């Protein structure tokens, strides 16, 4: 297989794009496509201060690398979850982020949940009624809260995450199976801030397949954590991804067209129901000043209050 641009040996063949490229042209293609996606969805500009949430995995580190190479003002944010059973997941993931930041000479901000809340995620989860013993619900809620608060407090313009097409399509598939119109309404490459305490969010890799971001990380020599979080085993999203991979093998491009058709339907006003009013009618949490859909404390503060009450 030869590179479409220069005729040298191709490093990657993207069946869904009918495009094979050599290493240099592939790395160039990822940069130009990312720039195109940022512009198409009006995610941010070169004047904006950007913070990228990094986990030590390939997607977030590749995204940080791409944004730096495109000359955006970008810093990293790592949230230490204290998940260290067995494979020392959090310790390892933090050190991959630190090594990357050192090599790039970029600033990495670190927030350790343990220091913020006097509890690691597994401890918090044991004391909370959320998630029936599985820490993912507590973890997701806490991460979202901490990322948002950090970005707002430090005055960034936008928070970006390394979600790729496979992540987005797995979420879309799950939300479609349940017809969760509120979630479908909110799923988007860019989420505007609709409250002074809510940061604008963007996902510049939302149209890249996971194998494309993995190939980028590999070809750039980015060192990243291969291990999954131990709690990811058996997650619904992993099951959905496996199903969608089978579909993609038989119909190359099926994931991308599912996602793009969804965005088009949304643009045409297909999901303008209750979910939309929820977004626009955000209240302010009296404890943290963050946004909440209910009157009173936000879900995060309610969880922390309950855990603290249980400990008294
Ligand atoms: S980190 Fe946290 Fe994930 Fe681990 S505990 Fe679950 S939600 S699986 S992205
Ligand atoms: Zn080439
Ligand atoms: Zn709150």
Image: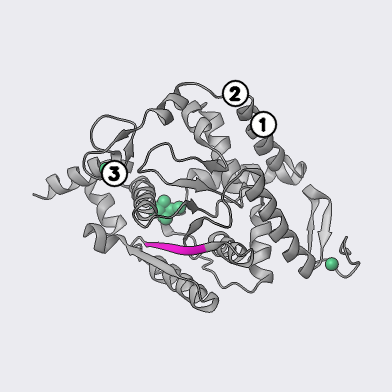
According to the picture, the residue beneath numbered tag 3 turns out to be 300
**Callout 3 crowding tier (Cα within 10 Å): few <14, some 14–19, many ≥20:** some
Q: Secondary structure at mark 1?
A: helix
Q: What's the distance in space between the residues labelled 3 and 1, CA to CA?
A: 33 Å
Is 183 situated left or right of 249 in this image?
left
Whole-angstrom CA distance, mark 3 to mark 2, is: 31 Å
- The secondary structure type at the circle numbered 2 is loop
Left or right position of 141 against 23: left
Q: Residue at x 35, y 48 (%)?
A: 145
Query: Residue 289's x, y, as percent?
Result: 27, 43
Question: Does mark 2's beta carbon lie closer than 8 Å to ligand 1?
Answer: no
> Which corner quadrant of the image does residue 271 belong to?
top right
Q: Which residue is mark 2?
A: 269
Question: Disc 1 designates what residue?
Answer: 264
Q: Quadrant of the N terminus?
A: bottom right
Q: Position of residue 311 (x, y in %)?
A: 12, 50
Location of residue 305 (image quadrant) = top left
Q: Marks 3 and 2: which is nearer the front?
A: 2
């Amino acid at each position: 297989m030869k590179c479409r641009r220069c005729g040298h040996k191709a490093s990657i063949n993207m069946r869904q794009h009918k495009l094979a490229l050599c290493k240099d042209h592939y790395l160039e293609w990822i940069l130009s496509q990312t720039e195109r996606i940022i512009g198409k969805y009006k995610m941010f500009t070169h004047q904006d201060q950007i913070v990228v949430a990094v986990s030590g995995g390939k997607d977030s580190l590749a995204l940080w690398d791409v944004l730096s190479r495109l000359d955006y003002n970008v810093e990293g944010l790592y949230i230490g979850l204290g998940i260290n059973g067995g494979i020392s997941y959090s310790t390892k993931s933090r050190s991959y982020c630190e090594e990357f930041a050192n090599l790039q000479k970029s600033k990495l901000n670190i927030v350790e949940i343990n220091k913020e809340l006097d509890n690691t995620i597994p401890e918090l989860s044991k004391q909370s009624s959320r998630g029936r013993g599985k820490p993912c619900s507590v973890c997701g809620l806490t991460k979202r809260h901490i990322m948002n608060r950090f970005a707002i407090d430090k005055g960034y313009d936008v928070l970006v995450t390394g979600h790729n097409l496979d992540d987005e399509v797995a979420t879309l598939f799950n939300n479609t199976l349940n017809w969760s119109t509120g979630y479908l309404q909110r799923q988007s490459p860019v989420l505007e801030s609709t409250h002074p305490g809510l940061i604008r969010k963007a996902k510049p890799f939302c149209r890249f397949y996971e194998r494309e971001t993995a190939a980028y990380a590999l070809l750039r020599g980015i060192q990243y954590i291969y291990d999954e979080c131990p709690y990811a085993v058996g997650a619904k999203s992993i099951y959905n991804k496996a199903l969608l991979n089978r579909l993609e093998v038989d119909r190359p491009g099926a994931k991308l067209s599912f996602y793009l058709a969804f965005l088009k339907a949304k643009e045409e006003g297909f999901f303008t129901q209750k979910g939309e009013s929820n977004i626009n009618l955000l209240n302010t949490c009296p404890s943290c000043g963050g946004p909440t859909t209910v009157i009173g404390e936000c879900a995060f503060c309610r969880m922390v209050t309950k855990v603290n009450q249980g400990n008294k």
